[in-house]
Image (tube, helix red, strand yellow):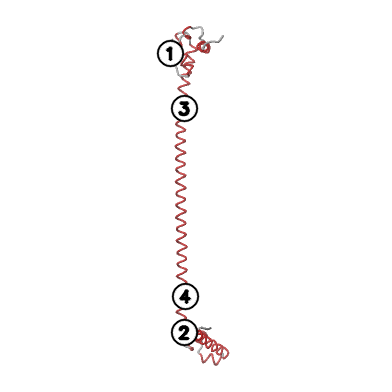
Amino acid sequence: MNKSKYQQRAEKYFVEDMSAALLPGSRLYNILERLEAGYPVPVSEQDFLSSKGLSALSIYANSLSFFVKGAEVERAERYRASTTISQENEKKLQEEALQARLKREQEQTAAGEEKKRREEAERKRRDREELEEENAKRIALKRAGETEEERIKRKYGVSVSMLKANFPDIFNAETKIKEGAKSCIKTKEQGAC
């Protein structure tokens, strides 16, 4: 024989002997439905249970109410904690994104500064080469206009006559070099040398 769900519920809460437990719409029936659904039972209903001699069921209803209220508070705290954690994670992600952006900007700035330093070094090198080239041209022009006597004096620190008298081999070598340079200049003008 199958028992009705009302009978089973009444047996679960040990009130199967009370006809009100099996009568839909009765106060006891409604209290059992609330307990079965897991809803808290109001204090007035707990008092009703106590007045009918159902102290154990009243205590259970009270503990269920306490459980539901406590569980609601705990759930709210978990939600608040997860929201806080989510907010903290969001802040952390935002901070990491900010740090990455700052690092990227610093790297770009450093790369720009390095490029400027390389360009400045290259500009200085070109300026130095141009200056050396100008100095070489100036010296070449100055030497081109210098007399034989001035060249010998500059090179050996003695006059031509003294070089010729004391170092005839050097003087002869210098004369050959000068004549070779003159002939090379003439041939350059003619397209040879």
Residue at 47% across, 88% down = 147
In the rendered image, the vertical position of residue 30 relative to residue 124, given as above or below:
above
The x and y percentages for residue 116 are 45, 61
C-alpha gap between disc 4 and disc 2: 16 Å
Mark 1 in CB contact with mark 4 (< 8 angstroms): no
Which callout, 3 or 4, points at the residue further toward the start of the chain?
Answer: 3
Distance from Cα at disc 3 to Cα at disc 4 = 85 Å
Q: Which residue is mark 1?
A: 45
| Mark closest to the chain's N terminus, 1 or 2 | 1
With respect to residue 83, does 134 lie above or below?
below
Q: Which residue is mark 4?
A: 133
Nearest the eye: 129 or 33: 33
Amino acid type shown at disc 3? Arg
Residue type, numbered disc 1: Glu
- Gap in angstroms between the C-alphas marked 3 and 1: 26 Å
Q: Residue at x 58, y 90 (%)?
A: 169
Q: Secondary structure at mark 1?
A: helix
Tell me the tag on residue 144.
2
Q: Which tag, 4 or 2, sits closer to the chain's start?
A: 4
Residue named by callout 3 = 75
Q: Residues within 10 Å of mark 1 (few under 14, many from 20)?
A: some
Q: Which of these two is toward me, 167 or 143?
A: 143
> In the picture shown, does residue 52 fall above or below 34?
above
Q: CA distance from mark 1 to mark 2?
A: 126 Å
Residue 154 location, x and y as percent?
49, 84
Describe the element under mark 2 as helix, strand or loop: helix
Which numbered disc, 3 or 1, marks the residue that appears first in the sequence? Answer: 1
Q: Mark 3: few, some, or many residues within 10 Å (few <14, many ≥20)?
A: few
Identity, as a three-letter code, of the amino acid under mark 2: Ala
Mark 2 surroundings: few (<14), some (14-19) or many (≥20) residues within 10 A: few
Asked if the residue at tag 4 contacts the one at tag 3, i.e. Cβ–Cβ closer than 8 Å, the answer is no
Secondary structure beneath dot 4 equals helix
